[in-house]
Image (tube, coloured by chain):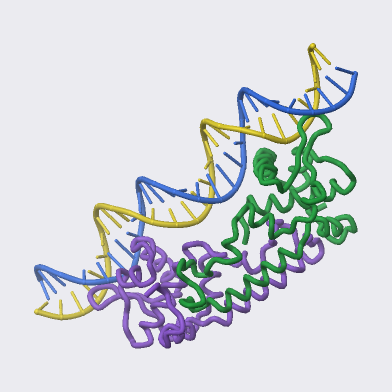
Chain colours: A purple, B green, C blue, D yellow
Amino acid sequence: MFSKTCEYAIRALILISQKSKNGCKTGIKEIAEAIDAPEPFIAKILHDLSRKGLVQSLKGPTGGFYLDKHSLQNSLADIVKAVDGDKIFYGCGLGLSYCSEKKPCPMHDKFVKVRKDIHEMLQSAKLGELQEQLEGKLAYLKQR
Amino acid sequence: MFSKTCEYAIRALILISQKSKNGCKTGIKEIAEAIDAPEPFIAKILHDLSRKGLVQSLKGPTGGFYLDKHSLQNSLADIVKAVDGDKIFYGCGLGLSYCSEKKPCPMHDKFVKVRKDIHEMLQSAKLGELQEQLEGKLAYLKQR
DNA sequence: TAAATAGATGACAAAAAAGTCATTTATTAA
DNA sequence: TTAATAAATGACTTTTTTGTCATCTATTTA
């Protein structure tokens, strides 16, 4: 459904949001370990996200990644759009560039509905809220 | 949502199903042209599909690809499973291998619902029926 | 202000997906 | 039975995605 890059990005931001609530910054090493991702790869991904303003960072000792108040409000839809683009929300399911209401592919209507559901699902999933599920042990990012 | 290979496969099979209803076989060249796909690539894809029994073919003059009665009953779900596997129906949205009811990721429940919808949508889309929409000019596989 | 820490940066490498090509094999019809 | 046709086959190339590495820069604290 999403690219690997996007999956890692989402998992990392959920984790960082958890730490940020306590006012903590999180280092690359800890993030990589906690979400089970290759350290250099997640470093690159977070760097990209920080340039896009989806995560904040500070260098030096006591430095690391964190989310400011605004970033905590971001939804998974915002992250997916930034990383994978919005093709998943609007593109034709059969890959036809011209496909539209006026010239629909045979699956057009059905795909429109499913994509709308996906969009709403991701839009309603805010980082700050997902994090609460981790806190309450209702959900996990790692096996243990 | 699907791989390019899978998109081409679906488009090709819908087209072939249309021709098959009239008892006609369709050649690679015509298929590639009609669904706007690279000829050698769709040739390889159809060959794979024929080995998996999702399409039938005959060599020689008057030969080509066609769908027998059984294959006409196949749904897009069958095609997607054969080409892309069933990760799209069952895998974790965040890419976590352990994710399950007992150890859910923070998005687990929401993804289960959306994936179920996708599965039902594809399962209910039979090649033989999609083809009727093309026939009635209610849908298109090409711009004109 | 020097040493240690931690992210920034860019070049590189490996793997997977997408696409191409030349040749072979099977079938049909003249 | 031979020539033409059309799919089968497998090797190859290109592009994209995924992942790695070495080095640089900024910040903090002793």
Q: Position of residue A112 (x, y in %)?
A: 72, 70
Q: Is residue A124 depicted above or below A99 in this figure?
A: below
Q: Position of residue A23 (x, y in %)?
A: 33, 86
Give the side of residue A26 with respect to residue A6, left or right.
left
Residue under the image location 53 percent in, 69 percent down: B93
Residue A112 visible in the picture = yes
Residue A70 visible in the picture = no
Residue under the image location 38 percent in, 87 percent down: A21
Give the side of residue B92 with respect to residue A29, left or right.
right
Residue under the image location 88 percent in, 43 percent down: B23
Q: Is residue A12 depicted above or below B9 in this figure?
A: below
In the figure, residue D26 lies in which quadrant? bottom left
Give the side of residue B100 with respect to residue B118, left or right.
left
Report the number of discs. Answer: 0
Q: Position of residue A123 (x, y in %)?
A: 58, 79
In the figure, residue B135 lies in which quadrant? bottom right
Q: Position of residue B12 (x, y in %)?
A: 74, 48
Residue under the image location 48 percent in, 81 percent down: A127
Quadrant containing the N terminus of chain B in the rendered view? bottom right
Residue toward you, A63 or B118: B118
Residue toward you, A79 or B30: B30
Residue toward you, B55 or D3: B55
